Image (tube, helix red, strand yellow):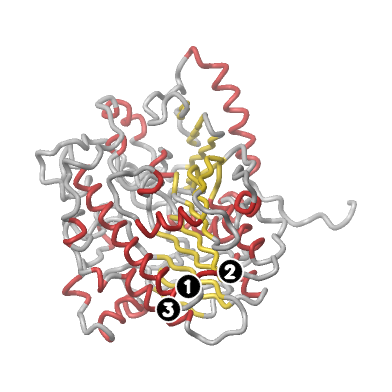
Amino acid sequence: MTERPNILWYCTDAQRYDTVAALGNHYIRTPAIDRLCATGVAFTRTYAQSTLCTPSRASFMTGRYCASHHVYRNGAERFPRDEILVTRLLADAGYDCALIGKLHLSSSERGEARNDDGYRVVHWSNLPYPGEAADDLNEYLAWLRNEKGVDPNTILPHYDLRDRGRSHAGQGDIVRPGAHEALRQTKWANEMALRFVAEERDGPWLLSINPYDPHSPYLPPREFLDRYDPKDVPAPVFRSEDLQRQPRFHGIRAQNVFARDPLDLGRPGERAPGSGAGDSFNARLIKCGYYAMIEMIDLHLGELLDALDTAGELDNTLVVFQSDHGELLGDHGLVYKGARFFEGSVRVPLIVSWPNRVAGGRTSESLTELIDVAPTLLEAAGVDVPYVMQGRSLIPALLGEDTATGKFMVVSEFHDSCNFSEGGNDPTQAFMSFDGRYKMVTYRGHDLGELYDLESDPDEFEDLWDDPAGRDLKLAVMSRHVDAIMGAISSGPRRSTRY
């Protein structure tokens, strides 16, 4: 690489793979993300290494699987001191690095302890509403008070630790109008980003923007919410049989384990499942709030891209747009996340745009993982990829006519990853592997598993795990599944002598 690019790394929270207009969702408006698709490559089968924030973020920041970096839990007391983040490597190579929003590599409720992460500038805001013990460290809330003259308590819901895993807005509504877009965390992130970019520097910059949206609760500005009608948006992936098959998994930890009918348009639907909604909920209304949140993010992303273009910074900027994990959003009667690996939960958007270097308007259906982002950034910057990174650089797929990644298996893990569950207190250890056709999930200590053929059953209704006619298939897939588990383990220190 003759010229090192700037890097804009934009990571949303809990955004599913199927939420981009240019990639086939005809119900949502995402002109800025569509713009990145038009100027870059969209990897349409990208999988998160965990369905929870902290282990997923630890994976794509290190380029390593959870079984290697051992960061399994949200709320972890610390991040391992010997793990090296890609931003540290880029900073050592001369990049000026900044973080805006959440880092979430360890517990954040009282302010997050940082390791040697390489960020010179950090504008920290884990949550976009008050109520955490770390409110005094939340720069977004300070921006509202000091620069916008607004008391956050008057325009934002209050965060209640006792209600984690439900609506995240107390016992209130999961979908309702929220603060004006000009006062949102994503707008604050833009202002902080442009201040950072405007600083004098000799070398390239890396800017990580990590908003909390579109994570629940879904409180978009009214004008965005009003653009979506529950009668128009598609229903979730659901059959009545889901209500009978999901009780097998009540002992598996997740924020929502009790399947409910998500198609009840007769109920108000604003309340989150698990917070008094009864045995049904209006998933289409929830989807309206979710889509409206993504449209608002897209507006602010577009404003940022335009501002960088006007400043002459965009032509030499590698832009990565992704999310950390997905959201069940009513699929199979479930919402939120946990040790369930349906496509809506584990599959995420990944779009890479590099003006003047990458031919745009292409898509790749090759298997891709979020751990592939870190080695991609290093190769683009001309930095050697450490042997301990398990991800695979996407640069060959970006720069060549062929967008194939050459990856034959993707994995995702859950190991006691969340400490709040609608079900029991079993910590749950689970592992998912997917080879492009067959998806297998195993649960340690439980006499159950899942096996789906996504070629014939893309919505994952037909679980083949207990199918007597499929024993040979199950054995063959299990062999590859065990191989994937072994491949996720760290290789450890490099051998330096013969003995």
Label 3 to label 2, Cα distance in Å? 19 Å
CB of mark 3 within 8 Å of CB of mark 2?
no
Q: Nearer the viewer, residue 175 or 492?
A: 175
Sequence order check, earlier mark of 1 and 2: 2
Label 1 to label 2, Cα distance in Å? 10 Å
Query: In the picture provided, is 321 more to the left or to the right than 146?
Result: right
The quadrant holding residue 423 is top left
Say what amino acid the circle numbered 3 marks.
Answer: Leu
Residue shown at the point (38%, 44%) measured from the top left: 18
Can residue 130 be seen here? The reply is: no
Q: Secondary structure at mark 2?
A: helix
Q: Which mark is residue 87?
A: 2
CB of mark 1 within 8 Å of CB of mark 2?
yes
Quadrant where the image shows the N terminus:
bottom right
Q: Secondary structure at mark 3?
A: helix
Q: Nearer the viewer, residue 496 or 307?
A: 307
Return the x and y of residue 232 as percentages of the image width and height. Answer: 19, 41
